[in-house]
Amino acid sequence: MMLERVEKAQRALDRARTAMQAHMPEQAMEHLDQAQLLAPDLEPLWLLRAQIALALNRPTEALNALDSLDFYYPKKRYEPAVMMTRGEALLRSNRDGLAQSLLEKLVA
């Protein structure tokens, strides 16, 4: 039963990615919500949620998703894609100092 839930969640994630590639972030978020209900600790879910939230101009929601990623997968916070997404969300939240500090670490 658990494997079936994870497989369904993975398919919903795939649909979310496809919707994002088609520049349809609202639909992507709907698919992502389905995936989260099925498997909230699925690793790619939280970064994708942050990226979709940014596409919808919701930087606070993006930061919350990245905080969840940190909770479930603390080592992921130092991956370049995660750091870039967090930096963009911080900039859009008018937290320029934090964004600059983070992004400087990325290029160092």
Image (cartoon, rainbow, N blue to C red):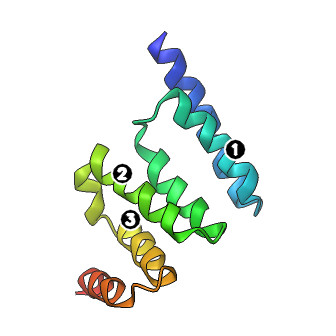
Q: Residue sitting at 36 percent across and 51 percent down?
A: 69
Q: Which mark is residue 69?
A: 2
Residues at marks 3 and 1, CA–CA distance in whole angstroms: 22 Å
Q: Which residue is mark 3?
A: 82
Above or below 67: residue 6: above
Horizontal side of 74 relative to 89 (left or right) equals left
Q: Which residue is mark 1?
A: 30
Amino acid beneath label 2: Leu
- For marks 3 and 1 on the same chain, the one whose residue lies earlier in the sequence: 1
Amino acid beneath label 1: Glu
Horizontal side of 94 relative to 51 (left or right) equals left
List x then y, in percent, for residue 3.
47, 17
Above or below 77: residue 103: below
- For marks 2 and 1 on the same chain, the one whose residue lies earlier in the sequence: 1
Q: Residue sitting at 75 percent across and 63 percent down?
A: 23
Amino acid beneath label 3: Val
Circle 3/circle 2 CB separation < 8 Å: yes
List x then y, in percent, for residue 37.
55, 31
Above or below 65: residue 45: above
* Residue density around tag 3, few if under 14, some if 14–19, many if 20 or more, within 10 Å: many
Give the quarter of the image for residue 30.
top right
* Residue density around tag 1, few if under 14, some if 14–19, many if 20 or more, within 10 Å: some
Circle 3/circle 1 CB separation < 8 Å: no
How many callouts does the rendering have? 3
